[in-house]
Amino acid sequence: KQIELAVIAGDGIGKEVVPEALRVLDVVAEIHGGLKFSSTYHPWSSEYYVQHGEMMPKDGLSHLTQSDAIFLGAVGDSSLVADHISLGGLLLKIRREFEQVINIRPAKQLKGIVSPLGNPQNFDIMIVRENSEGEYSSIGGRVHSGEDEIVIQNAVFTKKGVSRVINYAFELAQKRSSHVTSATKSNGIVHSMPFWDEVFKEVAGNHGDVQTNSEHIDALSAFFITKPQTLDVVVASNLFGDILSDIGAAIMGSIGIAPSGNINLNGKYPSMFEPVHGSAPDIFGKGIANPVGQIWTAKMMLDHLGEHEMGRILLGAIEESMQSGIKTTDIGGNSSTSEVTDEIIHKLRNK
Amino acid sequence: KQIELAVIAGDGIGKEVVPEALRVLDVVAEIHGGLKFSSTYHPWSSEYYVQHGEMMPKDGLSHLTQSDAIFLGAVGDSSLVADHISLGGLLLKIRREFEQVINIRPAKQLKGIVSPLGNPQNFDIMIVRENSEGEYSSIGGRVHSGEDEIVIQNAVFTKKGVSRVINYAFELAQKRSSHVTSATKSNGIVHSMPFWDEVFKEVAGNHGDVQTNSEHIDALSAFFITKPQTLDVVVASNLFGDILSDIGAAIMGSIGIAPSGNINLNGKYPSMFEPVHGSAPDIFGKGIANPVGQIWTAKMMLDHLGEHEMGRILLGAIEESMQSGIKTTDIGGNSSTSEVTDEIIHKLRNK
Ligand SMILES: CC(C)[C@H](C(=O)O)[C@@H](O)C(=O)O
Ligand SMILES: CC(C)[C@H](C(=O)O)[C@@H](O)C(=O)O
């Protein structure tokens, strides 16, 4: 089986960790026997912007459509181009144009990594984030200026978008511990969030076998710290999912290890896999970036491509490496990016 | 000096912890000598709603205007009335009508209380939350129905509101460690948040002695877990401040201890002091509610009324009581609400 990957390393440490994860994927293919990855590299990035005045060519998206998945590093380098341009022109553009309407992000405690909450916490949460609408809307603007300036920002929630993401969460929960928690704020945000609650209730009614609860985003954020073990699938709007997934990364031990998948549901376009961390220009080039986020992201991509067994083996190899103490500094080790990758490959080969 | 308090215990555990805090305030007055509190009680609550069809009388607000401060417990009991009605008709109404445009909420590690992050963390953060506009706007609505339903929610940010809260944060920072962190999300929310950033930059320019940084809300939420010691004053929009203050309560050890003040700046109306926790109907009546949130709230009210020395002494008494192990179950003790209050009073008398 030949898998076509469109690879966008992007900026900063994206350029360091993507090649490491691809090294790991080659070993996965080798072990599997019947699997082959063929990668097409796209140099789209903030540097590309400096040279070409755009984050990707006008027909850039058409170069991605034939791939089985997009494997992304990180986008953004504000010393070269403003974030809203780099992110809007590449990351958010692909999410939107390729109808990657769901973003899935695990917050799961890995063996060998100490949580700031202490060990063992044994939490295993999957955050299902709406990825196409809600608070991230380009609708809005300004009126008056100076001391009188007023800015309106619209959030847009559709029945289609909200029921889609909530249904996805329930179907996922049925394959896990059958519990869905909804992130709301209907006590303060009085149009969109009561609507979200209504749709949640409706979808819950169609999934009688799944237990549910609904928590305000402020309280739920606290529960990620005080009782993460009680959560299974958490479904959230675009903004709330964004916030919860960084909190999830923090309780896992480092933003450097958290993976994510941007899922296209209608099969018209490829899905995109990227770590939750950004491009971290401040540590770029030092060889200290944690490759685990990108490698765990490769595992999520394997799952998405139907290679669950290889995904399981890869996650096992990551955990064994962490337990052996070969870790980057952000999680208390002193190994380099490539040493960690080497160790994961070593564990993989011995499985 | 006679201080007129308007007291609204509200619902659930509000009815338990407010009388406890008033007992403490009486002892504060006694120790001070020249201070006297006179309380006017208002039974406005969800039960009041059941009897009267409204959360407070039509002329309710006029009964509060003459007070020096409003001392609130907690509002909301969804078994009696929907949250958006109880909160909208009482808590949010007072915040809005009395122009309590700033909400201040400390996230500070108290002696004697173990943080889920381990001890000692030595964080001492003050969250300054915009309390009158932003994401909590009543503007919005629905179009179409069924599968085509679309809901729009507007957020409204004004130059006046944003610069007011940011200025407040800088002035506060000058009395503390001279650092302000701004919570933004301008990489994803492209109208309101770039505006927020502009105003932040402008105000920062007028306060050259204060150090600043700006963090996206997702990353900043994680920093509350991974490096809270690096934060001093954090200024945030209504929604972001709401979320951060619950995270702050979680890292302090319990939502049951976090206090807050809703500050009126123009002197036209009283300010209102309330704990961050809700009415927790599930534990009401058991005598196990933590009174520390309400008592620490009383300390914030004392500060606001210019009684800084008494505020300092009261916080010291709270910390000594915690260190002596007299705590409610939410923070690892097994004492009752009134036992904790008794101990705090005991420590107060011995100061
Ligand atoms: C009850 C709710 C409307 C309120 C808010 O979000 O402001 C509460 O969470 C708070 O923080 O005081
Ligand atoms: C970079 C930013 C626009 C993005 C988002 O908020 O979606 C990031 O935080 C993420 O979570 O992928």
Image (cartoon, coloured by chain):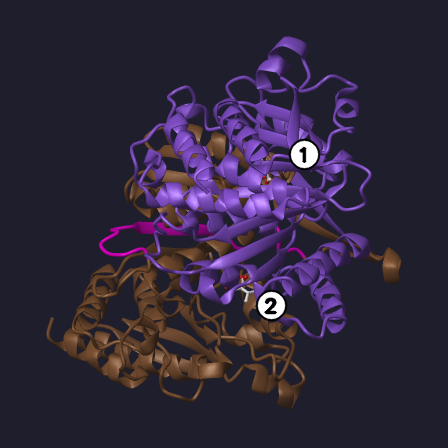
Chain colours: A brown, B purple
Classify 10 Å Cα crowding around label 1: few (below 14), some (14-19), many (20 and above): many
Q: What segment is highlighted magenta in the picture?
A: A117-137
**Above or below, comparing residue A109 to residue B317 in the picture:** below
**Residue ID for mark 2:** B179
The answer to if B88 sits in the magenta stretch is no
Spot occupied by residue B67 in the image (x, y as percentages of width and height):
74, 29
**Above or below, comparing residue B269 to residue A115 in the picture:** above
Q: Is residue A148 left or right of residue A4?
A: right
Disc on the earlier residue, 1 or 2: 1
Secondary structure mostly seen in the magenta stretch: loop
Check residue B92 in the rendering and tell me which mark sits there, or answer none: 1
Spot occupied by residue B229 in the image (x, y as percentages of width and height):
46, 64
In this view, the mark in front (1 or 2): 2
In front: A234, or B148?
A234
Query: What residue is at 24 percent from the left and 56 percent from the top?
Result: A119
Q: Quadrant of residue B345?
A: top left
> Can residue A101 be seen by looking at this rendering?
no
